[in-house]
Image (cartoon, coloured by chain):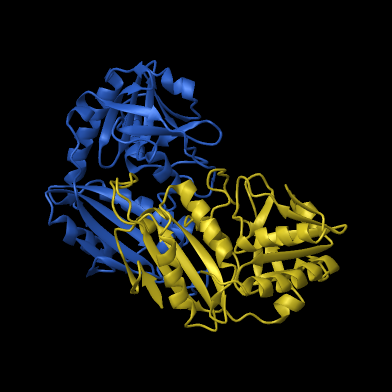
Chain colours: A blue, B yellow
């Protein structure tokens, strides 16, 4: 089910700048028991992205109405919001009056084996390197060729591929953020020149800080990551997946990972008690 | 008039990866007297891009038929080809069987004052920096947020903005490639980590070599560009526009620029005598 500017439809104008230039932003939100999870955080990130890309943020009531309309049809699903700059302009030049396109789609929740969460996943390093661009780093924008090319490197042998950037720093997974635990301390790559600041990443950082787990956003090398005591990836759909093997190394689902998973579960319960409107 | 996979339509499936990830390539081709100009060169670049992005190149007969069908409706126009990876897959992962989307659209030719060609244009340097990504450099792919943001920096005071990359090297205009003449020698920025290798850029390089104009693809600093004797930008729609002013400096429409413009005009005449099929 897809709403385009509030209307049920499956198609988009060919003239939309989302198609021509990837000129837009998106959010991928889990829906559980008819409720979009961490919606406030997702919308805050969307709004922040709009400010950087100079795309007008939609009317909040309209947006929430549409999100609610789709979410209430689903016990468990994935809500994808795409906001493009809309049609018009001459070439790269945007029109004087922007009419952004608001696309809200509800998809079935992907079926992942439960043991990805409990026992961990298999991961690898990708050959494809993330480019460097401080202006766009952090944003969940629609220029995602790097991730597409990285994900095309393997089929089903692994559940995630970790990506380095041009500086040979480990940044993230193709569809997730990365955390590593070393000597009881939590690290995640700093997102300053490459990568996306996932909503789940920000929540995990907050949970760590609230629970006296020392945490640092840092430049991480491949060797440092391989030398971790525990490793996990995160995003809004999978929550947290421990990594049980990376290249030829094995990792336990360790205590820090388990503690953060438990705290996240608690936090989700308390968050879902809030009314999204 | 727009053909999507051969059918006249103005819309695209929302599920198309072109929208979600900018997962595609495009070509912008001038149409003169019902004939797409330098079509062979454009299709060769499209094909080369397909190889890098692993998108199957369309059936050539089909593609040429559709291009001819649209071109013959126009005395003068702009033909835009977009080729996306199509719909499907799970997230960034592409489907096992790719069904690319082929979009061919004919637009009116933009009306530019004749003096842009004869007397030159006003240009500026953009604040927005191009990111670094050797894998994607050169390709005319649909991840073009950098150009959109750069073009949003000004309105009508200038005809083009020149972009530097993160290394502070001058790379190109927002919609054009850049050439500079210094001491009778032609320079254009090397496109190895940022920028697009325009079809017109490649033709100008060839014309220079064929006419004993010394030419070099090089790393160019802002100061070197500002210190040029002659400057011009190029693309497939404008051909060549001399720059008459950049920041606070003025430049003549010099002899080397004029020679290349004349040779390009000759070359276009000889090229258009070929049958595109």
Residue furthest out toward the right = B183
The answer to whether residue A30 is left or right of residue A188 is left
Q: Quadrant location of the N terminus of chain B?
A: bottom left
On the question of residue A276 being in view, the answer is: no
Q: Nearer the viewer, residue A192 or B33?
A: B33
On the question of residue B216 being in view, the answer is: yes
Percent coordinates x, y for residue B47 in the rendering: 50, 55
Q: Residue at x 47, y 37 (%)?
A: A128
Q: Residue at x 28, y 18 (%)?
A: A254
Percent coordinates x, y for residue A237 in the rendering: 25, 42
- Picture quadrant of residue A206: top left
Percent coordinates x, y for residue B4 in the rendering: 36, 68
The answer to whether residue A138 is left or right of residue B249 is left
Q: Is residue B180 above or below residue A272?
A: below
- Picture quadrant of residue A100: bottom left
Percent coordinates x, y for residue A36 in the rendering: 21, 50
Q: Residue at x 60, y 49 (%)?
A: B194
């Amino acid at each position: 089910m897809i709403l385009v500017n509030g209307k049920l439809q499956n198609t988009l104008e060919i003239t939309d700048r989302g198609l021509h230039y990837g000129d837009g932003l998106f959010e991928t939100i889990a829906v559980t028991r008819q409720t979009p999870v961490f919606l406030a955080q997702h919308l805050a990130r969307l709004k922040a992205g709009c400010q950087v890309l100079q795309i007008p943020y939609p009317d909040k009531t309209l947006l929430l109405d549409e999100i609610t309309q789709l979410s209430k049809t689903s016990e468990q699903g994935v809500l994808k919001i795409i906001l493009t700059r809309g049609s018009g302009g001459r070439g790269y030049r945007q029109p004087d009056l922007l009419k952004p396109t608001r696309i809200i789609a509800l998809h079935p929740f992907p079926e992942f084996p439960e043991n990805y969460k409990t026992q961990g996943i298999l991961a690898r390093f990708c050959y494809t390197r993330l480019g460097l661009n401080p202006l766009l780093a952090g944003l969940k924008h629609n220029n995602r060729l790097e991730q597409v090319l990285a994900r095309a490197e393997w089929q089903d042998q692994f559940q995630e591929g970790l990506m380095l950037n041009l500086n040979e720093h480990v940044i993230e997974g193709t569809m997730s953020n990365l955390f590593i635990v070393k000597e009881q301390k939590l690290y995640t790559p700093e997102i300053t020149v490459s990568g996306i600041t996932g909503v789940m990443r920000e929540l995990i950082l907050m949970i760590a800080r609230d629970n006296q787990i020392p945490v640092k956003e840092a430049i991480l090398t491949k060797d440092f990551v391989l030398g971790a005591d525990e490793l996990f990836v995160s995003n809004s759909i999978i929550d947290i997946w421990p990594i049980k093997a990376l290249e030829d190394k094995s990792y336990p689902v360790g205590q820090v990972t388990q503690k953060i998973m438990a705290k996240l579960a608690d936090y989700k319960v308390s968050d879902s008690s809030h009314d999204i409107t």
